Amino acid sequence: MHNLFVRKYLLFYYLVVCVGFVTCGYSQITISTPGVGFTQACASASSGAFNFSFSFFPPANLGPTNQFIVELSSPTGDFSSPTIVKTLTNTTSPVSSNFVFPPNTYGDGYRIRVRSTDPVKISAPSVAFSAYYAVHNQPFSVNGNVSTVNLCGGGSQVLQIDNTGTPASPLYYPQLTYIWYKDYVEIPGETGSSITVSQAGSYYAIVDYGPCVMNSYSNIIQVNAQSILNPTIQSAGNQTTICPASNILLTSVLQQSGYTYKWYKDNVLIPGATSATYAATQGGVYHLVLTSNGCSFDSNSITLNTTDFTLDIDPAVSTSIIPGETLTLTAITDAISPTIAWYKDNVLISGANGLTLNVTQSGDYKVVVTQPTPCNIVKEATVSIEYPSNFNLQIQTSPAYVSCSSTTVDLSISQFDATLLSGVTSLIGNSYGYAYQWYKDGVAVSGGTGTGLTLNNPALNGSYELRITMPGYGVIVSNAITINLSAPTPVISGSSILCDSGTVTLTSNVTSPNYTYQWYKDAVIIPGATTYSYTVNAEGDYYMAVTAGACTQQSNTISVVQDEITISSSTPALDLILPGQTKPLTITTDANGPQYSWTRDGVPVAGTTATLNATQDGEYVVTVTQTAGCPETAQYTFVLEYPTGFNVTIAPQAGYLACTSTSATLEITSFIATTSLGNVPMTDLGYTYQWFKNGVAVAGATTPTLNITSAAENGNYYLQITMPDFAPVVSNTVNINLAVQSVTISGNTTICSGGNTLLSSSLTAPTYSFQWYKDGVSILGATSSTYSANANGNYYITVGNGTCNMQSNTLVVTTETVTINSSTPTLDLILPGETKPLTVTTDANGPQYSWTRDGVAIAGTTSTINATQDGEYVVTVTQTVGCAATAQYTFVLEYPTGFDVTIAPQAGYLACTSTSATLDITNFIAITPSGNVPMTDLGYAYQWFKDGVAVAGATTPSLTITSAAQNGNYYLQVTLPDFAPVVSNTVNINLAVQTVTISGTTTICSGSSTVLSSSLTAPTYSFQWYKDGVAIPGATSSTYSANAEGDYYITVGNGTCNMQSNTLTITTAVVNINSSTPTLDLILPGQTKTLTVTTDANGPQYSWTRDGVAIAGTTSTINATQDGEYVVTVTQTVGCAATAQYTFVLEYPTGFNVTIAAQAGYIACTSTSATLDITNFIAITPSGNVPMTDLGYAYQWFKDGVAVAGATTPSLTITSAAQNGNYYLQITLPDFAPVVSNTVNINLAVQTVTISGTATICPGSTTLLSSSLTAPTYSFQWYKDGVAIPGANSATYSANAVGDYYITVGNGTCNMQSNTITVTLETISVNSTNPVVDIILPGQNKLITVTTDAMGPQYSWTRNGVALPETTGTLTATQDGQYVVTITQTMGCTTTTQMTFVLGYPTGFTIAIAPDTSYSPCASTSVDLDISSFIAITSEGNIPMTDLGYAYQWFLNGVAIPGATSPSYTVNDASQNGNYRLQVIMPGFSALLSNTVSITLSIGTVDISQSGLLCPDDPQVDLTSSVTIPSYGYEWFKDGVSVATGNNPVYTATAEGEYYVVITTPSCSFVSNILDLVLSDFSLTPDTPLEDVIIPGENKLLSVTTDALSPIFTWYKDGVLIPAETTSSIYVSTEGEYKVEVKQTQDCSIVKELTFILTYPLGFDIQIAPDGDFVECADTATSLNIVVFDALSPMGGTIDILDNNYGYGYQWYNNGTPIPGATGTSIAVNESGEYYLEVTIPDFGPIPSNTITVNLGFIDNVTIATNDVFCADGTTINITSNVNDSAYTYRWYKVGSSTVIGNSNSITVTEGGSYFMEVSYENCTISSNVLEVIPYDMSQVAISTGPTFDLPEGTTSTITASGAESYAWYLNGVVVSNSPSVEVSQGGLYTVVATVGECEETREVMVSVVENNVIAIPNTITPNNDGKNDKWALPAKYVNKDNVEIVIYAPSGTIVFRASNYMNNWPESDFTYSTKSLVYYYTIMEDNEITKRGSITIVE
């Protein structure tokens, strides 16, 4: 059907088109007129292509080779030589494409046409359009990109486009023309690349691209014009002399607000002097540079002088005074008629008003000198007179005195020195009247008031010191000397024989009470024996010591012995007695007439002979009494011990097998007594027996054996034996278990869910134990013969009797279930309003259905429901037949995550052209996680909105707009169930606006108006009136009342469519005024000027004003006599009441310039007279200077600022040198301030001058030099070495330094130089054999020694400027640095000199390590690493290093090895293989690392072990390597042949042979031992040492390991069987020899044994210590703990038994006294003392620990702090501490000084530094923290903008300060803000005063308002900081706007800048450019819409 229609249509077309043609082919086409998508084409390299379109018909007629050629005409529309801009091969119509304009496009009449080639056809030309190709499209520069050009004093300037020779300049393209602008108005005819300007204005150029606005524009140059100015300055009162602390105000005569001022002194710019006045405080030549409009003009110069006097004080430096001494202070001054006042410590000294003052006390002395004329000057000089800083008083003994040997001694003064500021002086033999007093032991010695003291009696022994009292100062205390004169030698006597309980008295021959006595026994002090006799009651060696002071003499020794008897016995003192046994005890004695008595355990027993028969254990003591001679007694002790225990072992007779045998007989296999000497076999001594089963006595079982014959008797059996004097002895326990019969379980194996089934055992007897299992796991609590199973699983039971168990059969229990299935997806999408059926199927019987949505029940009881919402749908199926089983199935329906609705007008709509438009939905989709889904209409609600307001009735999916009144922004809102309304995009509809015209009267009178009206007035339109092309603010209605001339039109708009009306020109009726008189003219003071005008006004009336004030005159002419603005107003009285004005400006000169000079012949400093005349008198005007004539002006001459009496004529004659001075002339003119001439200095001749004085001085002293001329009319200046000495301006000078001195004496500017005197200084020299530059190694000591020729030298040393304590010519240096020794000569001149030594550290170090020479990789098992080379590198060569206490750290594979901190390190384990380095840390240097040494040790001996036996019937042995690391390779060998390789350290051998393994590591291979496997053997190895130490109270495990099959273990102690020990291990508690015997009972029967020997320790070592973090004198409490508790092994070494639980007894002692209750292993200590611990150990007794002294702290910490802010040295802050206890002692220090600077708990300091405090109490001193006092760094105060800030004109910005606590902002001296920020809207000097505490800092910001002349957005910047095009500057409409956002993107697309309120400040100073591309991109967003975008090229 369709093809038939096409054929018919083509046939019709063919007939219609071909009618009238002679020939008509089938191949013709028609091409429509091409349409272009633009009215003008502004092309550039970056603009892209321009769109066009055309259509053709019919497409079928195109030939196969057809091309459409798009041709561009000439600029006039001519196609005679067209340019091809596009070639197309399209075959369908219409055609839309684009093309690029050629670079030579430049014109306003271009067209395009389309030409086809097959068939050939040419379209009609398109409409004409403007097209320009911007070959240059970037900003360019004019005159080097300057912003300002100044025309000074007329003239002109050429503005020239810069030719860079590159495409960056438009001059690169010679075909271009230009448009120049002045004040943004085109300058007609200026089309070249340069322009000459002579008028002020803003100039710039653009490349002429017709109507196209491109980026090719220049910088704007502001041209300023300025006439010539002649500035003049004057001094206040014409003064030229400045008094100290005062000033003279200099003023510019020319002053205007637009001027800038710069003051100069001596041709040097004065910083900050920028106002029209300047207060001068210093002498010099001053002038002013005045700048106006960029042009600068110099003023006249004024010379100012100063006056002052000098003041010195002698001595000039701080000087010491010795108490009792008198010093004279002298004031030296050249003040004229001075008054003198002296002060001490700022207190006036009454009557002290002379130049000298005698002082006798220390203090700060000040002299105040006042000079009353010519200036009242007060000066003061101060000097500090100080007492000596230290006195050193030393006393000594006579040389022959020897302590404890001499019998007499003389004490005298050996040293009495005072430390003065100038050095140390001796006061021995002084005559200052000091008082002397000797002291002994702190008590004054009666009569000891001389300088010496004699002692001759040991009773006078003691500590002596001398105290000297100084008047006005205090007491000086000497050192203390202890005197010990020799004591007498004593002799003692007395008896040496002592009877028992008797005494002997020993007596000394020395008995004086002045001595102290001490008796000794056996060299040990006898407490309390301190008299010259002693009564002895015990044997020993006795002597006595006599002490006088510290001297002691020892007596002879007497040995005192006691009479005694002895007892002996052949019976053992310690023996064993068994229960019921009898032991005879017998003794012998040497006592005379012995008597015997016996006790047992302290209780007497019958027996009075030497023998006793004992029947029990106990301690038996026999006492023998001697009845002849001394009544002596003696004792002998026997100890009979019962066994410590008994060991009974029972066992079943041979043949019994557990769980197999049916009967068993138990019998005693071992019965031994345990004693300390070993085990003893027991015999039956009538003991009783009782057998027990499971702890219950077996009735009748009272014999040594027991028969068990029934499995019911299964249980645990033991035997109890009762013996006299002992608790029953219990044997080991033997478990008897007989066989258990088979068991089965039964029950139902299927259950319903929640149901159960009962399972039953076939065995139910209560003697059995039961345990049910499910799935192989025991069921908790299921221990009966039945079990109710309620869960699926495999069930069985085990039935037991004793340790024998029987497992039943297994039953499988299962639960019946139902299943659910569905063909509906479990996860699906549901759209709003859609219905989704959900269906399930099930195998349940009688199913019931219930449904939920999101957990809430919903209607539905079948297998299907219809879902209409999203949610989780769950169906529950319940089976109602059979088991009540249930199951569930879940469906999840999800809504879309969102929706997207797109609307658009139907095709054909064109904004501002179409008259109607229909909006339709073009796209409506649902957004889901799986993708978008098209939406269909499911009854949704629609609502259209226009400009945010719902359109009434617009509720369908489309909307038609038919009227321009409906123009606006439209969007569609779709409402869906369960969702918020979905809003479409917004479409702007703008229909055409009709033509508009305006009308109204076009002529108005001045002050009246005319109403202009628009032909369109509907309120739906917007209106804007324009005047002269500029929108009139507020003129937005359809009418406008015009009251001014101009061209008016209106634009009427609707939406974005506008229509402009016709233009009406409004003119005003005016009158004209003319004059032949100049409008701007000069009038001189007193001159008359005639002003005349003419006018064309009808009936004119005239009125005149001067400077706005009406003046007489109603005609067209007036006579003016003053300057001012004269305005004549002409009023027309006929016709329009029009007025006009004409202005005349009469200007006074801007200033006057009077020049005076001396007449010819005058020569300064030579002539004796001079005449001054006026040489020039001119008026200064903007148009030039005008000579002045005398119009009756008044004259006055001035000398040195003072009017010369009578000098009132234009000339002045000076005839005397007394008149020398600075002269100027003052002329008084009407209406002007007096005009002051230049100053001329007149100086007449000065006479010859000489100086005299002493030419040699000591250091620190002075010599007075004097001038022969002293008259006060002269000026004086002293010189040293040709340089003026500041302040040396009197006729005398006190010289204190070497040099060549002379004086110049002047009068005016004439000077006379004196002779020269050379002052020299006495010096000293210093030498040294040490090199001045040397190397010092870290930790090394260097001895530096100097020698000097100074007399009485004193030495002081510094290191790097810091004082050192050494005071001799030798210094030991320990660090690098600059060491300076200062030598002061103390005899003669006090002269100093210095010598400097520089000790440098090495520039570097190298260190190498190496293994010891015996090390062999893969062979050595250990290696010693040591330093092989360690050198220091210096500029003079390498130096070998030695160990100077450096710190070492070894590293393995880069990780520090704990504890490896010595210069060498031993590696002894292959696990430590790796790369080693050594780090050395030296003082003052960073860590030094050595080379790397790789260590590969042998893994050691590789042992292989076996498990299993090679039994004949089953030969299988597992061989295992002792090294089992899986990363190693293992190759097993048998008889030398490889049998296995891989990573397995185990190999199973099945045949005899020699086996070994080869282990391969990454670097080495190792061969193991060889195992020779033979048949039938097992191994037995000890798990614990065979020889070991056992600790008293310890239970030690002895254990063996064997691979024997079914081994039987038997243990023995000291050869005696240990009953019941039948396992591979045993716990023992006593020493002895233990043997284990192992018998293999299966397979090959073999017996082996091992012996263990245990011994007690030799002793114990106990050490105590406080907590590890205990800090002495800091912690107020601590704990003492045992830190070492070692048993001393008899095999060497120690055994750590710390933290043992052996039940030892503990007792703590403090100061030797037991601490009650302190019986644990630790103790809490809260008081100081000496502590030790005593531990009581069985068999060893009490063992004491070490003793430690505990000093506890008295306070937790000392903290100092301050709340003050330290501003600078000289200000004060208070430092406080947290301690305030009067019992404590406080000492404050400044770091670096040992001087105590304070003694309270707080201190006030005035200088920076580091401070700390020490607090002392009892034996402890605690230091505080160090508080560093540094001036607050006010440089932290920062300003956000920097010191200058450019504020774009018309904008506001914020400047913020930071870094302080408070702020005050000032603008030109006025406070504008007290916050950190200030809003800036105008230019000026902004000052912020930032305050921190009492500290202040001032910062200034000069804000300049800059004019924004940018007219287009630039696309290049050159940020090279030359002030030109450094920033991306935008037109003013984009600057500092809240609604404008600027975003700049890097070439990569990332945002590098984003800001609102843009301030033309990008790029900022810290911006870093891309190195790959310098093209950045920007967008400009206005009101959230991007309105501009483009690129920015950074030109480097």
Image (tube, rainbow, N blue to C red):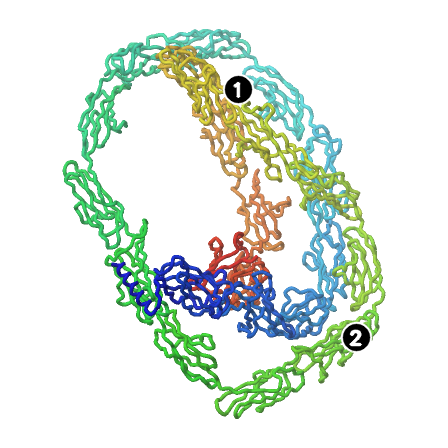
Q: Please, what secondary structure does the residue beneath circle 2 have?
A: strand
Mark linked to residue 1158: 2
Where in the figure is residue 1291, as x and y percent of width and height?
Answer: 80, 63
Callout 1–callout 2 Cβ contact below 8 Å: no
Amino acid type at image mark 1: Gly
Camera-side residue of 401 and 487: 401
Amino acid type at image mark 2: Ala
Camera-side residue of 914 and 944: 914
Query: Is the residue 1354 above or below the residue 1057 in the image?
Result: above
Camera-side residue of 1686 and 530: 1686
Q: Is residue 1941 visible?
A: no
Q: Please, what secondary structure does the residue beneath circle 1 have?
A: loop
* Other-residue count near label 1 (Cα within 10 Å), few / some / many at <14 / 14–19 / ≥20: few
Quadrant showing the C terminus: bottom right
Camera-side residue of 1316 and 942: 942
Mark linked to residue 366: none
Q: CA–CA distance between discs 1 and 2?
A: 119 Å
Quadrant of res 845? top left
Q: Earlier in the sequence, mark 1 or mark 2?
A: 2
Quadrant of res 1422? top right
* Other-residue count near label 2 (Cα within 10 Å), few / some / many at <14 / 14–19 / ≥20: many
Where in the figure is residue 789, as x and y percent of width and height?
Answer: 21, 30
- Using residue 1221 as the reference point, say whether residue 1480 is left or right of it: left
Quadrant showing the N terminus: bottom left
Mark linked to residue 1692: 1
Where in the figure is residue 239, as x and y percent of width and height?
Answer: 71, 72
**In percent of the image, x 58 and y 70: which residue is there?**
192
Q: Is residue 803 visible?
A: yes
Query: Is the residue 1603 above or below the residue 1989 in the image?
Result: above
